[in-house]
Image: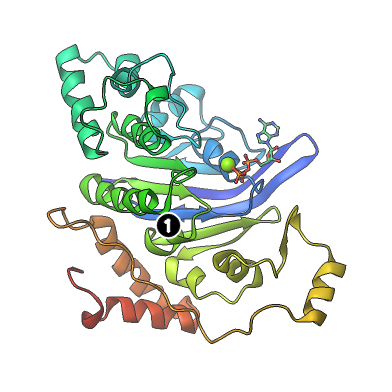
Amino acid sequence: MGIEVVVEGLTKSFGKQNIWQDVSLTLPAGEVSVMLGPSGTGKTVFLKSIIGLLKPEQGRVLINGVDMVNSSERDIMETRKLFGLMFQDGALFGSMSLFDNIAFPLREHTRKKESEIRRIVMERIDIVGLLGAEGKLPGEISGGMRKRAGLARALVLDPQIILCDEPDSGLDPVRTAYLSQLLIDLNAQIDATMLIVTHNLDIAATVPDNMGMLFCRNLVTFGPREVLLTSDTPVVSQFLAGRREGPIGMSEEKDAATLAAEQLADTAPPRTGPRTVVPQLEPSPGMPVRQGALRRRERVMSMMGQLPEAARTAILNSYAPAAGGARA
Ligand SMILES: Nc1ncnc2c1ncn2[C@@H]1O[C@H](COP(=O)(O)OP(=O)(O)OP(=O)(O)O)[C@@H](O)[C@H]1O
Ligand SMILES: [Mg+2]
């Protein structure tokens, strides 16, 4: 079962450049979360900080009692084995077949026999739909296949926490839809805690249980998906609508003058009440029920009192019997 990840007061700078400050959030055990944010806001730096590859100056990242920022390197290395990582660029070795790429973590970190490795690798290759391509080199397959190979490699060590950095980049809309379903099916099968960094609005709208957003060196918000999907906070609604009008500019932040001019010109489309929240993806037929979704329902129901009206309505609608086919 997935493990909770607790981030407390995290602050990271490179020299004088502060990337973000005082970031606190909890990734609930076995739930799927998405982190949004314009380019350069430090999403990749955040993922690297969670696994202890980068060291924030302040704060803690607690996983099973180990602090990935301040604990001993030995404890951090040990805890890192709980993770599966899918990098922004797939990060496959170009001279190795897909099979050898996916087998790499097993050969590196375990003493399993070659027959056992073969069984595990082929099972993961099957999960991501790459059966038959295992002998190919990364250069001989499409970008989407490389993504899925990266995902298969992230899965070989039975991770309890999975971090995916832009799993959809370079994929066409149909492949992105398949990938979304794959992520949900995976979560149903292994109940791992998942954090996905993405710019893709369809993934954001349909995959996660929870969503957060980094902007202007801060975590703007993190919470149940419905909170962001119905949010009136300008930066959140601008990002989720993919609009030019709003606080986010080409180089991240617009200056006050541009914003004021925009408000005068009133180019933003009129708001038409709360946005509709599309249903979250369900696991494919034949997949187990998502344990994380069951726990999430309890959790969200117990925090209803603290949520904005629009989010409450969306949550109640999504859990209403009429809304949901196979929803357990
Ligand atoms: N090792 C490093 N040393 C110095 N600066 C770094 C390092 N890694 C990242 N940065 C800086 O931190 C900032 C955030 O980078 P990061 O890659 O996390 O952004 P991002 O949100 O993932 O962007 P994108 O959506 O384009 O992937 C950038 O300004 C980057 O130049
Ligand atoms: Mg990045």
Screen quadrant of the C terminus? bottom left
> Which residue type does callout 1 highlight?
Ile
Q: Quadrant of residue 324?
A: bottom left
Q: Quadrant of residue 155?
A: top left
At x 21%, y 15%, the residue is: 112
Residue 151 as seen in the image, left or right of residue 232: left
Q: Residues within 10 Å of mark 1 (few under 14, many from 20)?
A: many
According to the picture, the residue beneath numbered tag 1 turns out to be: 203
Screen quadrant of the N terminus? top left
Give the image location of residue 247, x and y in percent: 72, 66
Quadrant hosting ligand 1 = top right
At x 39%, y 33%, the residue is: 142
Query: Would residue 46 be seen by someone viewing this image from the given angle?
Result: yes
Query: Closest to the observer: 228 or 177?
Result: 177
Query: Closest to the observer: 275 or 8?
Result: 275
- Mark 1 lies on a secondary structure that is helix
Give the image location of residue 50, x and y in percent: 51, 39
Give the image location of residue 160, x and y in percent: 32, 40
